[in-house]
Amino acid sequence: MPRPRAPSARLAPHAESRYGGRDFEETETMLIERIWAGNAYRNFHYLIACPESGEALAVDPLEWQLCLDAARARGWEIKQILNTHEHPDHTGGNAGLVAATGAKVLAHAGAADRIGGVDRGLAKGDVIRVGNVELECLDTPGHTMAHICLLGHSDEPALFCGDTLFNAGAGNCHGGGHPEALYETFATQLARLPDSTRIFPGHEYMARNLEFTLDREPGNADAKKLLESVENVPPESAFVTTLGEEKRINTFFRLQNPDIIARLREAFPEVGEHPDAKTVFLKLRELRNSW
Ligand SMILES: [Zn+2]
Ligand SMILES: [Zn+2]
């Protein structure tokens, strides 16, 4: 007997504007609970659960007790932990959660030694099973060189993107990453996912990133409107964007936009009139580092 459906994930009470109309009831295939850490790093943790078995996977559960409490409140059992990458603000909760649940730890095979205690090293194309839910591992270097994004396939796909892609922004490359690899990840993997893909990043940085978008592209009406609406939204209720929305508000997906290029040339005249997408990405990443 399938158990009764858990209540819907506590996700955004969406703005009534053009972001409205969707709610984030669980899909047929996957339950998602987003957990706001309430810490200085502004972490988001996620539980992904199977509606039939109640089995759950915790993504980057730094504040692991919050994750455990949320799982128990839903009647879910955390059996796996996924670290998107090796930074301590993503792995620091592993030990506590493993001690409390016996969960297995999964991470990129290339980060396993640095994380320690990893039970399963992951590579591109690997499938993670959470009860009847299947998640695909994307190998997404750039923020670090051993970073996994998890993709849940459904009518509304879900991307758990760690510190690779943020709402309206991109991860930095200071902690062992490389901007050229990050560009390749954006261009050849993330940008090619369906526009309906819901974006679940590792941190809540939306307002600050929208300000950067508007600094680079002051005429971006979508970014302006969204910034006005997010300024009054507490982080635990932050909007969930889709990839299609990101392509309108995230500078790092708007690399051939004439206004962005014109403004970029004020800082870097050497890029010329028709810089390629990679050059624009690298220069934007460089500007964002000191912005
Ligand atoms: Zn990181
Ligand atoms: Zn992080």
Image: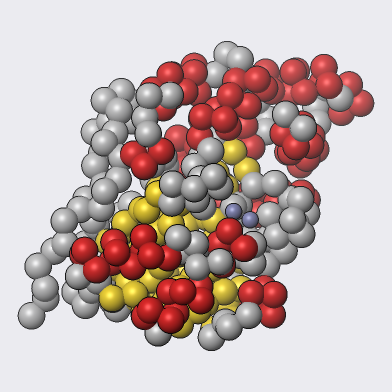
Residue 248, placed above or below residue 69: above
Q: Report how many numbered discs are placed on residues in the image.
A: 0
Q: Which residue lies at the image location 54% right of the left edge and 84% below the top edge? A: 120
Q: Which residue lies at the image location 58% right of the left edge and 58% below the top edge? A: 89
Instruction: Inspect this view and state whether residue 234 appears.
Output: yes
Image spot of residue 9 (x, y percent): 25, 53
Q: Residue furthest right?
A: 270
Image quarter hosting the C terminus: top right
Q: Which residue lies at the image location 49% right of the left edge and 48% below the top edge? A: 39
Residue 163, placed above or below residue 2: above
Q: Nearer the viewer, residue 256 or 218?
A: 218
Report which quarter residue 159 is drawn in. bottom left
Q: Residue furthest top?
A: 219
Image spot of residue 135 (x, y percent): 42, 69
Image spot of residue 249 (x, y percent): 52, 30
Image quarter hosting the N terminus: bottom left
Image spot of residue 233 (x, y percent): 36, 30
Q: Nearer the viewer, residue 254 or 88?
A: 88
Q: Is 127 left, or right, of 131 in this rendering?
A: right
Q: Is 32 left, or right, of 184 in this rendering?
A: left
Q: Is 246 left, or right, of 232 in this rendering?
A: right
Instruction: Inspect this view and state whether residue 200 appears.
Output: no
Q: Which residue lies at the image location 87% right of the left edge and 28% below the top edge? A: 271
Residue 226, placed above or below residue 92: above
